[in-house]
Amino acid sequence: MITNELAFVAIAVSDKERARKFYQETLELKPARAQMDGAWVEYDLGPTQMDGAWVEYDLGPTTIGVGCHPAWKPSRDGTTIAFEVEDIDAAIDKLKGRGVTFDMEKTETPVCWMAQFRDPDGNKLVVHKRKK
Amino acid sequence: MKIKAIAFVGIPVTNMNRAREFYEGVLGLVPDTEMTGEHWTEYPIGGGTLALASVGEQWKPSQDGTSAALEVDNLDAAIERLEERKVSYDKVDSPVCQMAVIEDPDGNKLIIHKLKSENEKGICK
């Protein structure tokens, strides 16, 4: 029933300006639609639901949507995104230099290296480097 | 720092067999057998990877937080399948898409997603 596509991965945040700074400045993700200049897309899902905001970042074939909505809460548990990087040591150094703390330092598995950190809302994120 | 791709989207589960019955039996995903074991199962979807992880207390499921949206070609057929398998869902319409929001057996939220045809090359993608 599922086509060959991950439509998007959605990250819930509580403060859209703080999240914009983190995802666009700390992680250096580029907002998907340049013509909108990285602005949040404000949306209204109708009278039964409260207004929200949403910004998208394209990473290869997959889109990440960072969304702010009163009915949708961040979590320290649950689904997690792993970002593939070229140089994991450089990525970890850079993030630490920007004040990011890691709750799992660089760890080796049979197929990869990874390290785990948090966004400002506590959502779990991973930097990941595949072994060849 | 150059993030070049999403390596994977990882979903924590507490019972790998029950989770696989849901992701494979209900959602119809096909695992990559090379990367599948007791604690970890991978499903290649397009250029992305959805992974199930069963690693105990250090990584627990949640009804809040990050969520994966899975694109279907026919939302009505997908909903019929969910009803057949007694999976409850919330149907949500947005200006650009229709969604059925469901939970896996551990309560992790998933979005079954269908772009409106006029937006398939548009705002969501």
Image: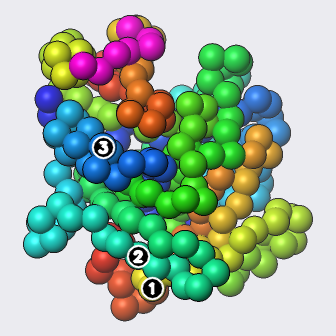
Report, in whole angstroms, how far the alpha carbon at label 2 lies from the one at label 3: 19 Å
Q: Amino acid at mark 1?
A: Pro
Q: Give, as a three-letter code, the residue at label 3.
A: Arg
Side of B36 relative to A112 (left or right): right
Query: Which residue lies under the disc numbered 1?
Result: B95
**Residue at image point 17% right, 16% down:** A97
Left or right of B16: which side holds A8?
A: left
Residue at 76% across / 58% down in the picture?
B26
Q: Secondary structure at mark 2?
A: strand
Disc 1, SS? loop
**Residue marked by disc 2:** A43
Return the x and y of residue B62 as percentages of the image width and height. 67, 39
Check residue A103 for magenta coloring.
yes
Query: Splitting the image into 4 quarters, where does residue B73 fall?
Result: bottom right
Cα–Cα span, label 1 and label 3: 26 Å
Query: Residue A11 got which mark?
Result: none
Q: Crowdedness of circle 2 by 10 Å Cα count: few (<14), some, many (20+)?
A: some
Tell me where the magenta segment starts and ends, as one range: A99-105
Q: Image height check: is B113 above or below A23? A: below
- Kindly tell me whether residue B11 is visible in this rendering: yes
Mark 2 falls within which chain? Answer: A
Mark 3 sits on what residue? A18
- At horizontal 72% and vertical 71% (from top left) the residue drawn is B90
Number of numbered labels in the structure image: 3
What's the chain of the residue with tag 3? A
Figure check: B81 above or below B87: below
Left or right of residue A34, residue B75 in this image: right
Q: Quadrant of residue B106?
A: top right
